[in-house]
Image: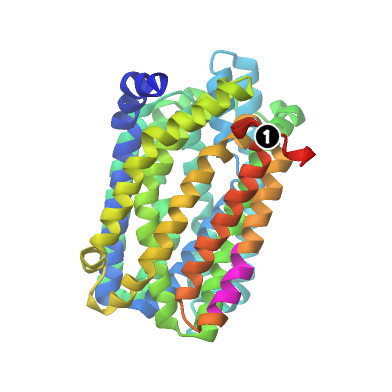
């Protein structure tokens, strides 16, 4: 307990204050402003369609960048004083990412009509939005690679400025497009928002232009690519598949209940993302490096329960307050038309609470590179999330089934996590039982 508190006082709060909190709060405010504009000018139906497009964009952003972000940060940080290894890392990342992004862009552009039919079921044709996404995708990829390199060099002040200015620019353009073009404008803003930030990131690139000389075709390394593969496959598996499953669930709600109910589910999902951003950023900042240092199960057990005792009470109180003030939260972020969203809070909050409990332990998969444990548990979660959603939506003939499924899925996922780490956490030899 004392070790955790000392770490928070000495390191974590300083870092969060200087980077994470500033970035996350800016993103949350931008998200709330955009959600409000969508609620006022478009409504629940539009929010559902925008949700499908956002998930598609998130999935293909990860695919285009090959899930390299965390790997780049780690290896640039490790080799920043070793010019040979740094050159190999940057060269491999740049050319692999360039090839991947071009392929994804070509695929999206020439299959825009098919993608449109998949994410906008039985609705207007927004093929041109997918084509715009394909055109601006390379700028997003350049932005993310530049961002990760600066992160690896610990250029936190530059990152803060880029984050703040980028978010302000993105939300300003989004609000203008939504006001002028309603749904069409909102959809365009979704596909261009992250790419626009590249204009700001150029400043950071100019400051690090000496790194351009490190990028050479002859320095592309299969060994580096293999090292990056661990981070890449893990990121691709979750960050690519989970948004696609979310699209499938939202489309199922549209087909079996209504567009409006799909919009209500998107609304509660957005609210959930806003408060989870703060919690997950703190967990990632402290737990991942801490778990990487731990060598024995006794220390791992101590760290997990110390974290639970210190953080979980605050989390529980926070979620209770969210539940008590749910009416005002909905009215602040959305409008009176979204009043049915209030009925979805209970199951969503319980599911999110259990989700955080499980994530705290599951970070050990990343810290110790437990590849197959991570893949199999994530596969279990994704499959369970979809199947239970379909089951409970049909059972209750209501969108409430989707949030119940969210809760049930994470309870089951948490159970699997506890089984895997049972011997470490509780002194039980699970395999012998």
Residue extending farthest right: 432
| Position of 305 relative to 174 (above/below) | above
Image position of 105 (left or right of 7): right
> Residue at point 59% right, 33% down?
425
What is the secondary structure assignment of the residue under circle 1? loop
- Where is residue 16? Give x, y as percent: 33, 31
Q: Was residue 159 drawn as part of the magenta stretch in this picture?
A: no
Q: Was residue 387 drawn as part of the magenta stretch in this picture?
A: yes
What's the magenta bit mostly, secondary-structure-wise? helix
Structure colour scheme = rainbow
Foreground residue among 27 and 8: 8
> Residue at point 35% right, 48% down?
316
> In which quadrant of the rendered view does residue 25 lie?
top left
- Where is residue 100? Give x, y as percent: 65, 49
| Position of 31 relative to 260 (above/below) | above
| Position of 182 relative to 237 (above/below) | below
Q: Is residue 140 visible?
A: yes
**Which quarter of the rendered picture does the C terminus lie within?**
top right
- Where is residue 287? Give x, y as percent: 49, 31
- Where is residue 2? Give x, y as percent: 38, 19
The residue wearing badge 1 is 428
Please give the range of residues in magenta: 385-393
**Which quarter of the rendered picture does the N terminus lie within?**
top left
| Position of 253 relative to 73 (above/below) | below
> Residue at point 61% right, 67% down?
386
Image position of 360 (left or right of 273): right
Foreground residue among 404 and 427: 427
> In which quadrant of the rendered view does residue 70 lie?
top right
Image position of 207 (left or right of 116): left
> Residue at point 29% right, 75% down?
338
């Amino acid at each position: 307990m004392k070790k955790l508190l000392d770490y928070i006082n000495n390191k974590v709060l300083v870092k969060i204050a200087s980077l994470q909190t500033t970035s996350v709060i800016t993103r949350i405010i931008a998200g709330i402003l955009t959600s409000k504009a969508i609620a006022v000018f478009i409504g629940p139906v539009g929010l559902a369609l925008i949700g499908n497009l956002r998930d598609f964009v998130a999935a293909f952003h990860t695919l285009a960048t090959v899930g390299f972000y965390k790997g780049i940060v780690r290896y640039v940080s490790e080799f920043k004083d070793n010019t040979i290894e740094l050159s190999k890392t940057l060269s491999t990342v740049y050319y692999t990412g360039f090839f991947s992004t071009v392929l994804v862009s070509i695929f999206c552009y020439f299959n825009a009509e098919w993608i449109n039919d998949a994410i906008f079921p039985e609705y207007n044709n927004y093929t041109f939005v997918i084509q715009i996404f394909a055109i601006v995708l390379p700028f997003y990829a350049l932005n993310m690679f530049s961002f990760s390199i600066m992160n690896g060099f610990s250029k936190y002040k530059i990152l803060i400025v880029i984050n703040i200015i980028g978010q302000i620019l993105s939300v300003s353009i989004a609000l203008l497009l939504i006001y002028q073009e309603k749904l069409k404008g909102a959809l365009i803003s979704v596909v261009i928002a992250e790419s626009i930030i590249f204009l700001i990131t150029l400043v950071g690139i100019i400051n690090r232009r000496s790194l351009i000389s490190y990028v050479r075709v002859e320095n592309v390394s299969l060994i580096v690519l293999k090292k990056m593969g661990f981070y890449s496959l893990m990121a691709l598996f979750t960050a690519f598949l989970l948004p696609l499953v979310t699209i499938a669930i939202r489309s199922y709600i549209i087909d079996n209940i209504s567009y409006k109910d799909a919009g209500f589910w998107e609304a509660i999902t957005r609210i959930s993302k806003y408060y989870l951003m703060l919690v997950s950023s703190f967990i990632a900042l402290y737990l991942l490096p801490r778990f990487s240092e731990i060598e024995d199960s006794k220390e791992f057990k101590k760290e997990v329960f110390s974290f639970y005792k210190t953080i979980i009470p605050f989390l529980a109180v926070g979620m209770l307050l969210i539940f008590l003030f749910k009416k005002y939260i909905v009215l602040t972020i959305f409008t009176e038309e979204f009043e049915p969203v209030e009925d979805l809070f209970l199951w969503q909050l319980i599911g999110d609470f259990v989700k955080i409990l499980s994530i705290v332990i599951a970070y050990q998969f990343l810290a110790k590179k437990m590849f197959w444990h991570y893949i199999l548990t994530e596969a279990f979660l994704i499959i369970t999330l979809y199947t239970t959603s379909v089951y409970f939506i049909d059972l209750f003939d209501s969108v409430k089934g989707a949030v119940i499924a969210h809760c049930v899925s994470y309870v089951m996922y948490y159970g699997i996590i506890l089984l895997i780490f049972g011997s470490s956490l509780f002194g039980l030899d699970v395999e012998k039982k």
